Amino acid sequence: MPLLTVENLSAAFHTRNGVVRAVQDVSFQLERGETLGIVGESGSGKSVTCYAILGLVPQPPGRIEAGRALFGGVDLLACSHRQLNRIRGRRISMIFQDAMTSLNPFLRIGEQLIEPLMIHEKIARSAATDRALVMLDEAGISEAEHRLKMYPHEFSGGMRQRVMIAMALITKPDLLIADEPTTALDVTVQAQILELIRKMQNELGMAVILVSHDLGIVSGFCNRVLVMYAGRVMESARTDDLFYHTKHPYTRGLRNSIPALQMKGAELHTIPGQPPDPHHPLPGCPFAPRCAHAVEYCAREEIVMLEAAPQHGTACLRVQKENLSI
Amino acid sequence: MSPSAEPFLEVRNLKTHFPVEKGFLFKRRLGDVKAVDGVSFSLRQGETLGLVGESGCGKSTLGRTILQLVRPTAGAVILEGRLLTALRGASLREARSAFQMVFQDPYASLNPRMTVSDALAEAMQAHAKVPRRELPGRIGALLEKVGLSPQARRKYPHEFSGGQRQRIAIARALAVAPKLLVADEPVSALDVSIQAQIINLLARLSREMGLTLLFISHDLSVVKHIADRIAVMYLGRIVEIGPAAAVIEQPLHPYTKALISAIPIPDPRREASRARILLPGDPPSPLHPPGGCPFHPRCLHAIERCAQVVPALEPFGQSGRQASCIRMREINPA
């Protein structure tokens, strides 16, 4: 049985300017110990998908319109608050892009580290502190005993993210959701943090969902990738298949616009146009207006995810109908 | 135009130090943050220099000091034979039409109450007496140059997406027909697919208009694509400078090596096969820089002498490459 099964998740925000369908019909499965990457540009719905799973979408203005998220036999989207609280922070943990806004600036690091243990495992303070020391050490923070007494502002950006990771993993969760965990960090520090997440994953055997805008990070880190655009999954495949047997024009365009693969001189490949306005969704495939392969029916027919090869889903109508090679 | 033997822009031993004070009434000076600490380089006309480094390395301050938005503590900036660092008041304002800046955040750098056409007209008239009846034509030409439709002129900044706003910011910088453009992280706030559009635009403009471009970024892969030469900064100093392809393919300085190895490549097989240099620790605080080579506490090649000697930029090979590492020749067999 998969660790997490998300089926047909749809979430919307009801704003003054109308309804924004942030996530539409997202489905995926996650096995124990697996690493899933969710890639997309801003507004693609990748973060909202994760927030919805953890019941973190504020309602109102948000609303989970449809779907199930089964985790250990419990539907996270339909269960009671108490049930959710027993799972969040204990069996599923989350880390965010900006560690400073997720740490309490008024509390010492030590207090914040042992809080999840005291809540979820109801162990004595001294035992919890011992675990916190071990955890900080594991997360690569030296002089752990001294650091426990420090406040968040006394740490650098990379160190804060290490503290966040220590905090998220202190309860030994089965699933870690990391939402752009390195976007605010410098590249050399980013490499350290990704290495740390990988090491902890090996030690604890947990599954990881890595949300990122950066295909480069995902290529080295994840077993499987979902590519999202305008609230929908465009392609879902094992990482190698996604890169070497691409089955959606958006994935191809995204990958080709990364300068890392192109030398100076040649014009950089671009995706023309702008992402769609979430307030005014167009019929048909949301990528059609920017797609070089789009034909008449792309702007008309509803898209659905279908398997185009074993374990390789695509929402591209032309790949589905004509077996177009991208 | 200056004779080709003379560089278009020359920066000589430039230093920008910010005092750090404590207390309100009785200020104590705690020391200086040496944001830029002895930087020298020169640029030919039409050349693009990519300036890279991590946050806090002083790359933005260097860009601003060159444009005299921040006045230097010491050193000289010479643009077309003119000593910018000596200019004051009206003469500096007059000189500014030769150099412009594009900032990271296009949301913050445009006045929300001005239409695109007003913003461009203001920039044009600030430096040159453009007759009123010529304005619409010039604005139209400028918008076309940066890839915006003529309808854009009547709109306000909030009606545009991030990428389009950055195009407006570029148009405004070009409104005074500058010769030098400093772009400070111009694509960092944009999505990948939009980034590529803006990079292409800047590359095309510099080619077509003969613009000299100082492109500041934390992202080496972006810089690699647009720059003729690359300069790598660490704690206020340039640690390596040279032709872009050479710096990327065969970095000399241990810091450049680590920086390049840390860039994720969107190719799973190459990602899996390459060796990554993991640097220990964080970049040190510029308020308390380590003695000797500023990089030595994180360097994998550091020896005792590295903590004692401040290395200078020294030439390596024939291709105009320079790096500041006392072990450069040991760790890079020629």
Image (cartoon, coloured by chain):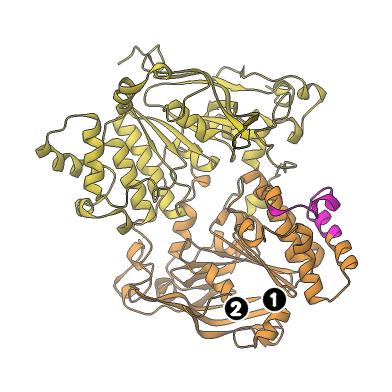
Residue B138 placement: quadrant: top left
Do pointers 1 and 2 mark residues of a single chain? yes
| Percent coordinates x, y for residue A78 in the rendering | 60, 88
Shown colour of chain B: yellow
Chain drawn orange in the picture: A
**Residue located beneath label 2 in the image:** A55
Above or below residue A22? Residue B241 is: above
Which image quarter is the C terminus of chain B in? top right
| Percent coordinates x, y for residue B223 in the rendering | 49, 38
What residue span does the magenta drawing correspond to?
Answer: A133-152
Q: Is residue B326 left or right of residue A283?
A: right
Which image quarter is the N terminus of chain B in? top left
Q: Is residue B206 left or right of residue A214?
A: left
Q: Which mark is drawn over residue B22?
A: none
Q: Residue at x 75, y 63 (%)?
A: A112
> Closest to the observer: B326 or A156?
A156
Q: Residue at x 47, y 66 (%)?
A: A44
> Given the image, on which type of amino acid does mark 2 rest?
Gly
Q: Is residue A201 visible?
A: no
Determine crowd level at label 1: few under 14, some 14-19, many 20+ residues with C-alpha closer than 10 A. Answer: some
Quick check: marks 1 and 2 in contact, CB under 8 Å?
yes
Q: Is residue B136 rendered magenta in the image?
A: no
**Residue located beneath label 1 in the image:** A88
Determine crowd level at label 2: few under 14, some 14-19, many 20+ residues with C-alpha closer than 10 A. Answer: some
| Percent coordinates x, y for residue B148 in the rendering | 26, 50
Q: Secondary structure at mark 2?
A: loop
Q: Is residue B31 left or right of residue B63?
A: right
> Given the image, on which type of amino acid does mark 1 rest?
Arg
Above or below residue A79? Residue B166 is: above
| Percent coordinates x, y for residue A130 in the rendering | 89, 62
Q: Chain of mark 1?
A: A
Q: Secondary structure at mark 1?
A: loop
